[in-house]
Amino acid sequence: MNAFKGRPDRPGYPSGPSFKGDLYYDEPLASHTSWRVGGPAQRFYQPADRDDMVAFLGALPEHEPLFWLGLGTNLLVRDGGLPGTVICTLGRLKRMHRIDDLHIYVETGVPCARVARFCADQGLAGAEFLAGIPGTLGGALAMNAGAFGGETWRLVSEVETITRTGDAKLRKASQFTIGYRSVRGAAGEYFISAVLRLQPGEASVSRAKISLLLARRAATQPTHVPNCGSVFRNPQDDHAARLIEACGLKGHRIGAACVSEKHANFILNAGGATALDIETLIDYVRAEVETRQGVRLHPEVHIVGEKHSPWKVD
Ligand SMILES: Cc1cc2nc3c(=O)[nH]c(=O)nc-3n(C[C@H](O)[C@H](O)[C@H](O)COP(=O)(O)OP(=O)(O)OC[C@H]3O[C@@H](n4cnc5c(N)ncnc54)[C@H](O)[C@@H]3O)c2cc1C
């Protein structure tokens, strides 16, 4: 079955029965990001599975821009959207199973919370912190996401990556340089799956730990209003939230974007914000903290896309 939606709008673009995923045109990315803002993806591909992904990339025209999207929980997509093709892994690269006593195999479209629950149910310890990270495993690998003392790459034994042209490779964790919210190595490759190494544990203990972490998160973070988690990386030996609060910026608003009263490093979409509202507020907070505290903050969220669509949106 060829499940392609829309019309093939570019000569040489993969189409036909050999591709089993779903292709959409001008797909609104506001529906795929936790801030609920952002313009369209010019082309948006949801692969049927890993093998379909490999075949699709192998056939993609050479100069087509490519962007990988997980759950969009660390992304500010500008209002003009993303040209080229967005690959959406969520719910598509979804296989997860236990390999042996301590190892599991997980594809990168699996939400981190599911990985945490799976490990707990299997009596494997060490992945509990993932329960509080609202993205996919792919996003967590790209960001080295971490919480409550845990970090994604401390669990990784090896990953499967894929190049822009569909060449899949197995890479050991030791081939990457890992830091705070930073992962370097294998430039130009994307993550398809990972083998994670856990510790022996007990299901009831891991489940209790997960409940505790989620309760702590709910008490300290604005979980019911669209946001993107921490906007800025913490500077060495300090906290971005403390610096922002010290500038009196809690509650500061530009358009419908607003610095959270509950956690100063969170920016909320208070209802109907544009990506421009949010980006303008990010720039404002950054400038205020630099002027008043002498510290230059760096965004943790990835800001991508165009302010105005360079292609015609129907
Ligand atoms: C309420 C809230 C709380 C949060 N708390 C935390 C926290 O405690 N700790 C923390 O670290 N983060 C936190 N975050 C941020 C975010 O959840 C993490 O950064 C997460 O890992 C992003 O995953 P994602 O699937 O949403 O990635 P996306 O936002 O979709 O993408 C993020 C980046 O990863 C890249 N990417 C995605 N998938 C792949 C892939 N398969 N291969 C290569 N690159 C890929 C994208 O291109 C993009 O550059 C929070 C966010 C929210 C909304």
Image (cartoon, helix red, strand yellow):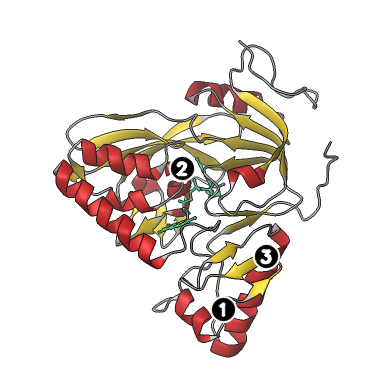
**What separation in Å lies between label 3 and label 2 (alpha carbons)?**
30 Å
Residue 307 on image: x %, y %? 77, 56
Image quarter where the N terminus lies is: top right
- Looking at the picture, tell me which residue is in the foreground, 210 or 147: 210
Apparent side of residue 217 relative to residue 45 in the rendered image (left or right): left
Q: Which mark is residue 138?
A: 2
Horizontal placement of 307 versus 265: left or right? right
> Foreground: 131 or 178?
131
Q: Which residue is mark 3?
A: 256
Q: Residue at x 36, y 61 (%)?
A: 217
Q: Comparing marks 3 and 2, which lies closer to the viewer?
A: 3
- Across and down, in percent, residue 238 comes to 41, 79
Q: Quadrant of the C terminus?
A: top right
Q: Is residue 192 above or below residue 302?
A: above
Q: Can see residue 200? A: no
Q: Label 3 is placed on what type of residue?
A: Ala
Disc on the earlier residue, 3 or 2 = 2
Which amino acid lies under the numbered mark 2 shown in the image of this protein?
Gly
* Amino acid type at mark 1: Arg
Mark 2, secondary structure of its residue: helix
Q: CA distance from mark 3 to mark 1?
A: 25 Å
Describe the element under mark 3 as helix, strand or loop: loop
